[in-house]
Image: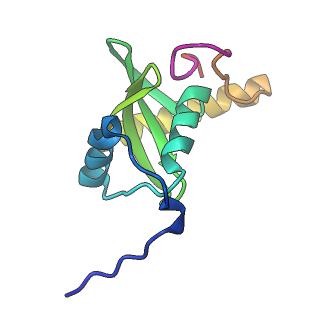
Amino acid sequence: MTRHFSYDERWNGVAIPAEHWHFHRRLLDRYGVVLGPGDFSNMMDGLRSGKALLIREKGKGRALYQWRVKSTAELIFIVAGRNKVFTAYPPNASLRKLAKRLHAERKALRKARGTEPNTAPAGEPEMAARCP
């Protein structure tokens, strides 16, 4: 059986840096997701701005985040820190349950304050603000 792939013209002249290959391989292995052009940049912007859901600190400047890939609507777990993505964390039921609870708490807190999620101050070296 022959597979038919459609080439996205937005990939013309674009390449994935070598330092991100581990993340992309794990993402494909663990979630079956290949990011489209712009998805990685959107994810990094979400991590920096605090839009990604912080699940837990992992130590050594790393943290576990949840992010929804826009092109596939897939929820993924990411280990990242200090403007760098390390790996796509394997999905499991307990993480999804924890993320759902944290999301509900975050939403209730924003509603009570009448505000949007906090964002990291300009020049902040961390990926995202550490409070919801």
Q: Is residue 71 above or below residue 65?
A: below
Name the chief secondary structure element in magenta.
loop
Query: Residue 113: x percent and y percent?
Result: 77, 22
Residue lying furthest left in this view? 1
Query: Residue 115: x percent and y percent?
Result: 77, 27
Residue in the image at 49% along x and 68% along y: 8
Residue in the image at 26% along x and 50% along y: 30
In the rendered structure, the answer to whether residue 54 lies left or right of residue 131 reads left
Query: Residue 70: x percent and y percent?
Result: 54, 54
Q: The magenta stretch spans which residues?
A: 122-129
The quarter holding residue 66 reads top left
Quarter of the rendering occupied by the C terminus? top right
Describe the colour scheme in one phrase. Answer: rainbow
Could you tell me if residue 67 is visible in this image? Answer: yes
Query: Residue 51: x percent and y percent?
Result: 60, 33
Residue in the image at 48% along x and 41% along y: 67
**Residue 91 falls within the magenta-colored stretch:** no
In the image, 48 versus 75, the foreground residue is: 48
